[in-house]
Image (cartoon, rainbow, N blue to C red):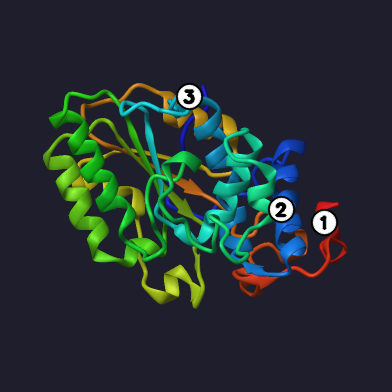
Amino acid sequence: MKQATTVDQAPAKGPDLDARSKAIRRRILQALAKQRVGGHIGPAFSLIEILLVLYDECLRLPQGAAGSDDHDRFILSKGHGCLALYAVLEHKGLISPELLDRYCSAGAPLGGLPERNISLGIEATTGALGHGLPIAVGMALAAGITQKHFRVYVLVGDGELNEGSNWEAAFHAVKHRLANLTVLVDRNRQQSSGPAEKVLPMPYMPALWREIGFNVRHVHGHDRPAIREALLVPLSSPLPRVIICETKKGKGLGEFEGNAEWHYRQVQSLSAIPSLF
């Protein structure tokens, strides 16, 4: 069994991206090029392997058009990474290619930040950072009150954790012993205004969550088997879980990986990014 790292350090290079991961990244760029609009490419590219494991193996999704109130919930709190969510939803056949091709066009349901649309698999409107985890805690608490059996997964950015509302929500999750809640941290160590450690240092992140009372796992965020093992391993105690995923902003962009200029960018032509083609 693959062991999760316990050292709070930047990840090694990690596994190469497989054809599936590359295809989803290409699809994001194709959608942007088609509409000639900008998008948060770097933040989206750090999320893709996490989302693939969630949608492949973890989330119990609604069956049929009517859906079910007992289905699992996923909230992308780091809303500016939504292109990854849209592309994975399309890849899994949950939304049509036409919807992604209309990204950010007038009247299109898929915009630069997620807007709640249950029929499209979007559980919450996010983008104002620090809101997704409190929403997820409320949903997880409601599951117990209403005697439902759904699980709640929420993906937050490491820079987003500068928002104090996250930590208030985390304390409540432990107080109410929300073992049906899983927090995934996209730890790419960058924010739009610079390296996360320079904007507001948050050292020893695994220890912070552990001290609050969470079950903590620490993995390479582009290693799908490691993410899968961390998500599926039985909890050591009936408390919420956090999985800290060490990622690379812009993963897959070759020489542009980690480049702050690719936080938000317009794509005019796919030929400008030879590393993916």
Q: Position of residue 186 (x, y in %)?
A: 47, 52
Q: Nearer the viewer, residue 132 or 112?
A: 112
The residue that appears at 59% across and 60% down in the rendered structure is 249
129 vs 16: above or below = below
Amino acid at the residue labelled 3: Gly
Classify mark 1: helix, strand or loop: helix
| Badge 1: residue crowd in 10 Å (few <14, some 14–19, many ≥20) | few
State the image quarter where residue 221 is shown: top right
The residue that appears at 47% across and 29% down in the rendered structure is 65
Q: Position of residue 118 (x, y in %)?
A: 42, 41
In three-dimensional space, the C-alpha distance between marks 3 and 2, rounded to whole angstroms, equals: 35 Å
State the image quarter where residue 197 is shown: bottom left
136 vs 9: above or below = above
Residue 242: mark in rendering: none
In three-dimensional space, the C-alpha distance between marks 3 and 1, rounded to whole angstroms, equals: 39 Å
Assess whether mark 1 and mark 3 are in contact (beta carbons under 8 angstroms): no
Assess whether mark 2 and mark 1 are in contact (beta carbons under 8 angstroms): yes
Q: Which residue is mark 2?
A: 252
The residue that appears at 62% across and 54% down in the rendered structure is 45
Q: Position of residue 53 (x, y in %)?
A: 54, 33
